[in-house]
Image (cartoon, helix red, strand yellow):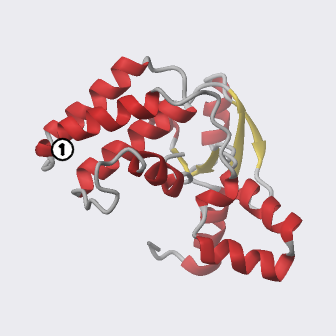
Amino acid sequence: GTLRWQLVMDAECRRFFMRPDLQLPEDALLSLRVGAYQLLFLDRIPVHAEIFESVEWVKYSGAARQAGMVNAVLRKVAALPKPHNFDAELAYPEWMVVRWRKIYGDDICRQICEEGQREPRTALRLLTPEAEAALLAAGITLVPGAFLRKARYVTSGSISDSILAQVRAQFQDEGSQLVAELLGNGRRIL
């Protein structure tokens, strides 16, 4: 979510900077993005705990001098009215939205942006033939992927990394799996 809404998180935080052109160390910037995303989109973590964790992250990184600024900015972000309904077009570079609008028109451009901002379904890559039966035995309900035999979508149940290691499966979007199948031929692809 933080990556999908990165441009929006940057804009929301930057409006509270004393100097809008301020260049931050990467750790401070990452802490602000993650913190702002949690404050604006999630509701399980109490506000004070979220701000505390973001500030602690900065303190123990290479950006400790920015801890006070991160604290102040996130407190201001936390005070913004809720719910936050951001226009999905804001999550994309302006040049890209202009291009899509020119090629596809307003309605399709809006649909592209909205679809791109939806949280993807949880997809798995099954690494062994026995993996699916083991996941089903662990109470996880699966449906086949749209394109690949080894792909499954999780429809219910909770998956931990330890379960995945035991049953030989891994989280991987079906689109990524498809690229590996089409281009990989057994090679690793970054």
Residue 123, image x and y in percent?
A: 65, 47
Q: Residue at x 44, y 39 (%)?
A: 36
Residue 58, image x and y in percent?
A: 20, 40
The secondary element bearing badge 1 is classed as helix
Q: Which residue is mark 1?
A: 66
Residue 107, image x and y in percent?
A: 88, 64
User: What amino acid type is highlighted by mark number 1?
Assistant: Gln
Q: Residue at x 58, y 49 (%)?
A: 128
Is residue 157 in view?
Answer: yes
Q: Answer left or right for 33 relative to 186.
A: left
Q: Residue at x 67, y 58 (%)?
A: 174
Q: Answer left or right for 144 relative to 117.
A: right
Which one is in front, 57 or 32? 32
Q: Answer left or right for 32 relative to 112.
A: left
Residue 149, image x and y in percent?
A: 74, 57
Query: Is 41 rendered above or below residue 18?
Result: above
